[in-house]
Image (cartoon, helix red, strand yellow):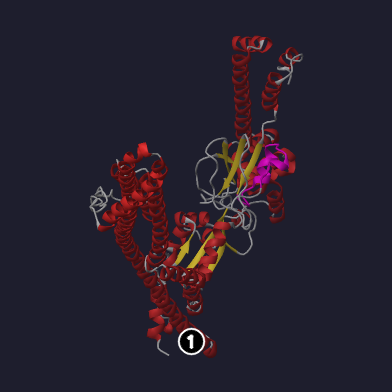
Amino acid sequence: MGEFDELEASVHGLDGPVAEQIHAALEHCRAPIVVQVAGRAGVGRTSVAAALGLAPDTVTTPVDAIGRPNPTLDADVVVYVVAGAPHPADQPPQERTLLVRNKVDLSDIRGDGLPMVATLALTTARHEVTSGDFERFRALAQSEDATLLLAEPLFGSAEADVKRDDRVALLQRWGFAGVACAVTALRRDHRLDTARLHRILRSASGVDAVAAELSARVAAARASRRDVLYADLAAIVARTGCEPVERFVRAAAHV
Amino acid sequence: MSDAALNDVLDRWDPQPPPVHRAGVFVTSQAVLRELAYVGVLVATDAARAAAALIVLDAGTAPGRTEAALAAEFAAAGRPALLVHDNPDGGGSGLVVSSRLARLARELPDERIRDASRIEDLAGVVRRACDEPSTDPLPALLAQTRDRITAAVPADTDTAALQRERARLLGARDGGRTEAVAALRAAVQQARVDLAHEVGTRVRAVNAAARADADGGQSGFLDRFGEAVHKAAAAVDRATERRLADLHRSLLGTAPAPAAPAPPPDLGAPPEPVRRRVEDRMTIVLGASAGLGLGRFAVAPLANLPALEVAAMPLTLLIGAFGAWWLARSRAQMADRARLRQWASDALANLKAQLEQRSVGRLLAVEADIADRLAVRAADRTVDIEDRLATVDAEMRRRTTERSACARDLEVLARHARELAGTGARGAASNPA
């Protein structure tokens, strides 16, 4: 980012403690915003990180793991993933936490946090809805059996005009959450095409809302870094009366 | 073997005895607990009173420390703990249930949903686990109690420290009185020697001055002598007080009470006035005769001069008289000086005795005072030490009692453990709880 190049150029000639302090403040401001993805084992931290496009090393060791201390959650933004019923070991930090409730398709429990089905998000990112899938979804949508979309164990045995092998293939590709979502959408609106169905599936995964919230948090962290930088620079000006820094701070205040 | 003795031991060491009756299953998930209750399983809300535990892993999560701790708690008491996956993603392995489908099955009575929820299967497993005769808790209880007792037995190192403390207190039991008295005695002896020396020095100095003075004759001698004696006495008194103050301070750390001013020393009667004695008269006669002889010898040449022969007789008499007077006077003076010296040395001997008596008397008074105070101090200290000794003794007695009580309890436990090992597993009926 180049917005501080001017400042850096103007203090280029300076040296001594003032320059060091300015450089330290700039370093702090420019340091990357760190994101951690944390949660107990099995809640889907890796899938959530992948669906959000975060690097695998943002995933911490599990919370409440046997024979291992809890990870230190000290990132600028902590994506804390929970799944299923509230668990006593889930103690996300009060500040800096973006709470994600993963696997919302599996239980009826509603609580705090943004809902997400990370596996469905990953599937929609990797696959398009093929015409074969679309036809089978349509056939399933014709079924009158109320148990069809209740739960995965019932899906295979429910009465519908799709062969068992095809149902298994659908489950393998889209997961039960994806299948249930697609069939429900087609039942409501049979005029949908594959592209719109794909968008609906992606939207149902909740990943976009989480990604938007995450980027807002990252931006907020960045802004707060910048506030700290300006406070540091103002303090340096107050102490030393450094002319170029003062010009920079005043210009920033005008903006 | 008496179970009563074992029960006593177990009761004494277990503040929270295991519940008499355990029933029902403790479930970590409210949803599963509710569904189990709907199908008629006895559930327990208190883990301590539950017969078994059902540890629920929701939505495909893995067991963590929380689950492991609960499983260990139940395992320690010989109670079964089951792990079940609720609403798993994918097939799920091991015991699986779907509380969600179970709830749906209650709302839409449909056999397929009920079967798919597998709640009945779980209920069967849980019932069997609850009814399972739990493993005999007695061995675990014995081991647990033995550990408690072992941890509570007072350590030997503590006792050794107490014994050392006791020996130290015993050594100091008289409150340091012996040492203090010995120190006082030594200091008083030293002071006595010093003061005797001081008195001797002062008196000798007065004596030497008086001797020299007495050679000068009697006039004013008594006044000067008296003054010198007073000075010497005052100096001795000062030295005595200084010495006593040192003594007081070194032994008690306080200053002594000031002494009452001492009366001036008594020098006895002044020398008696000169009385003419027979020696004096003899001296006069001897002086007169010697004078006459001398006069005769002196005027002998005059006899050759007839003109002066008349004067010879009176001159002889005159010289004789003068000789008598001079001899008598010289003799009187010598006698006087000897008398004064004699008197002065008698007076000084007397003075020395008085001063010595005075300083020693003062010293003894102060010694008695210091000894009294030391005794009081030592008595105070002795009371303290006796108190502490009593405390230490009581503590040691308490520990001895405790240790032997612990040993007795351990013996009871060991005997039961041996019997248990001999007879194999005991029935639940003999559970002491």
Indicate yes or no whether the magenta region holds residue B229: no
Q: Position of residue B371 (x, y in %)?
A: 32, 62
Q: Quadrant of the N terminus of chain B?
A: bottom left
Q: Which residue is mark 1?
A: B415
Task: Please identify the quarter of the rendering in which residue B93 is found.
Answer: bottom right
Badge 1 amino acid:
Arg
Q: Residues within 10 Å of mark 1 (few under 14, many from 20)?
A: some
Q: Chain of mark 1?
A: B
Q: Residue furthest front?
A: B306
Indicate yes or no whether the magenta region holds residue A42: yes
Q: Nearer the viewer, residue B64 or A140?
A: B64
Regarding residue B28, the answer to whether it shows in the image is yes
Q: Position of residue A165 (x, y in %)?
A: 72, 55
Q: Nearer the viewer, residue A108 or B384?
A: B384
Q: Is residue A144 left or right of residue A61?
A: left
Label 1: element kind: helix
Region in magenta: A40-60
User: Against B33, is A179 above or below?
Assistant: above
Residue sitting at 63 percent across and 37 percent down? Answer: A75
Q: Is residue B52 left or right of residue A69?
A: left
Q: Is residue A186 left or right of residue B249?
A: right
User: Against B90, is B223 above or below?
Assistant: above
Q: Quadrant of the C terminus of chain B?
A: bottom left
Q: Nearer the viewer, residue A49 or B59?
A: A49
Q: Nearer the viewer, residue B83 or B398?
A: B398
User: Against B161, is B267 above or below?
Assistant: above
Q: Position of residue A41 (x, y in %)?
A: 63, 52
Regarding residue B335, the answer to whether it shows in the image is no
Q: Position of residue B315 (x, y in %)?
A: 33, 41
